[in-house]
Image (cartoon, grey):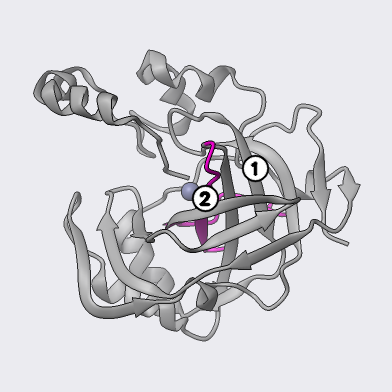
Amino acid sequence: MTFLRISGAVLAALVATGPALAEHHKSYGYGADNSPEKWGQLDAKYALCESGDMQSPIDLAGANAIGKVALSVNYQAGPLTVSNKGLTIQADFAPGSAMTSGGTTFNLIQIHFHTPSEHAISGKRYPLTGHFVHATEGGKLGVLGVMFEEGAANPELAKILAAAPTEKSERATISGQIIDPNGMLPADRAVYRYMGSLTTPPCSEGVNWHVLKEPITASADQIEAFEELMGDSARPVRALNNRLVVAPE
Ligand SMILES: [Zn+2]
């Protein structure tokens, strides 16, 4: 996932010193010289990518418990705002949509995508995944992952693709276009649940991961369009390291 929480003061400092930072900053990616294996060495702030022991993604077939996670979503349709972040395409959401898991409410902030999926099941990866990124009022992160398999086109993905800027760093709010996050969820809300991390630098831990077991469909053309926009954008799976991973019943 690609969400980084920074305070207004930090943001102001970044803006003020932007050009200098840019010169010294090595950007992460999925290519030969900045691949996930090297993230921990690109920047001191990314050390956890290498040293962390609660990292994501994982192979969910490693689940060591079975249970029903009390998960509910209350998502509202809203204006479509899409950004091309280079490594991902992201749709941002206004306040008002939330996921409740185990009694904790996480507010939906954005949905972004990876090709192929980052989480695997017995080594199998789906061609596309969406990460619904949420945070509690106190700043705890919760992500809901949805897998896309090839099949019928998804109407909400169609809106995102039609609006997605082709140039990196561009952001577009599409006048009059409404996106409904509910249209990117399967009927069955059974999830795998475990504690993990951001799957991109700084690889921060403490992320409440939920991955829906039931995939939904995207057309071959939609999957190909995301691949063209983002390229290979999946971090290899990480070791479980004695974590509790709950599979749905
Ligand atoms: Zn992600």
Q: Label 1's element?
A: strand
Q: Secondary structure at mark 2?
A: strand
Measured in 3D between alpha carbons, the distance from the residue under mark 2 to the one under mark 1, in whole angstroms, is 9 Å
Q: Which residue is mark 2?
A: 134
Q: Residue furthest bottom?
A: 152
Lower position in the chain sequence, tag 2 or tag 1: 2
Give the residue number, with chain letter if any, for mark 1: 208
Q: Position of residue 179 (x, y in %)?
A: 38, 75
The front one of 241 and 207 is 207
Q: Residue furthest top?
A: 44
Q: Check if residue 146 falls in the magenta segment.
A: no
Q: Quadrant of residue 22?
A: top left
- Circle 1 packing at 10 Å, graded few (<14), some (14-19), many (20+), is many
Residue 81 seen in the current view: yes
Q: Is residue 186 left or right of residue 43?
A: right
Residue span colored magenta? 111-138
Instruction: Verify whether residue 128 appears in magenta.
Output: yes
Residue 121's spot in the image, x, y percent?
Answer: 72, 54
